[in-house]
Amino acid sequence: MDKRELYDNFENMEEMSRDVQAMLASVKEEMTRIIEKNAELEIENQHLRERLHELEQKKTQEISNEEAGLSKSRKNLEKLYEEGFHVCNVDNMYGSRRINDEPCVFCQDVIYGERH
């Protein structure tokens, strides 16, 4: 090989090196963009998980409050039953009657959960 061929080969190698460096820079930019997007998605995902947890806690609290309210209502009905007060008249819309001053069938059913 003479000097000219060596010089041409060297120029070709420099050009190929610049092309490789440009491709590596492009790959690096794309990888940086992907990493940044992944970090954004992870943060958003964390916020969504936190919000879901908050909603689950709120729903659990609401259910607990409803159960407490129902329990209180049932206790109040049982108290009325025990104290001899009657919610229904002798003849009510369900056709039940009190006999010997006992609560009507409807009231008993409500207290003991047989009617919904």
Image (cartoon, helix red, strand yellow):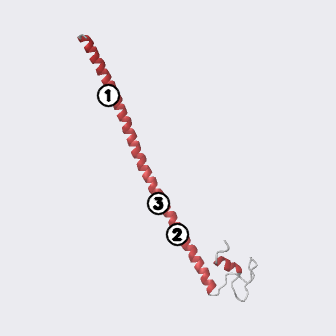
Q: In the image, which disc is placed on residue 76?
A: none
> Which residue has dot 3 on it?
54
Foreground tag (1 vs 3): 1
Eyeballing the image, is 4 above or below 95? above
Mark 1 to mark 3: distance in Å?
A: 49 Å
Tell me which corner region of the image, top left, top right, bottom left or bottom right, holds residue 89: bottom right
In the image, what residue type sits under mark 3?
A: Glu
> Which residue has dot 2 on it?
64
Of the two numbered discs 2 and 3 on the same chain, state the one appearing first in sequence. Answer: 3
The residue at the point 43 percent across, 46 percent down is 41
Q: Position of residue 43 (x, y in %)?
A: 41, 50
In the image, what residue type sits under mark 2?
A: Ser
The residue at the point 34 percent across, 28 percent down is 22
> Which residue has dot 1 on it?
21
Residue 29 left/right relative to 106: left
The residue at the point 44 percent across, 50 percent down is 45
Q: Position of residue 33 (x, y in %)?
A: 38, 38
**Of 50 and 88, which appears nearest the observer?**
50
Label 3 SS: helix
Eyeballing the image, is 89 above or below 35? below
Q: Residue lying furthest front in this view?
A: 1
Label 2 SS: helix
Mark 2 to mark 1: distance in Å?
A: 64 Å
Of the two numbered discs 2 and 1 on the same chain, state the one appearing first in sequence. Answer: 1
Crowding at dot 3, Cα within 10 Å, few <14 / some 14-19 / many 20+, comes out as few
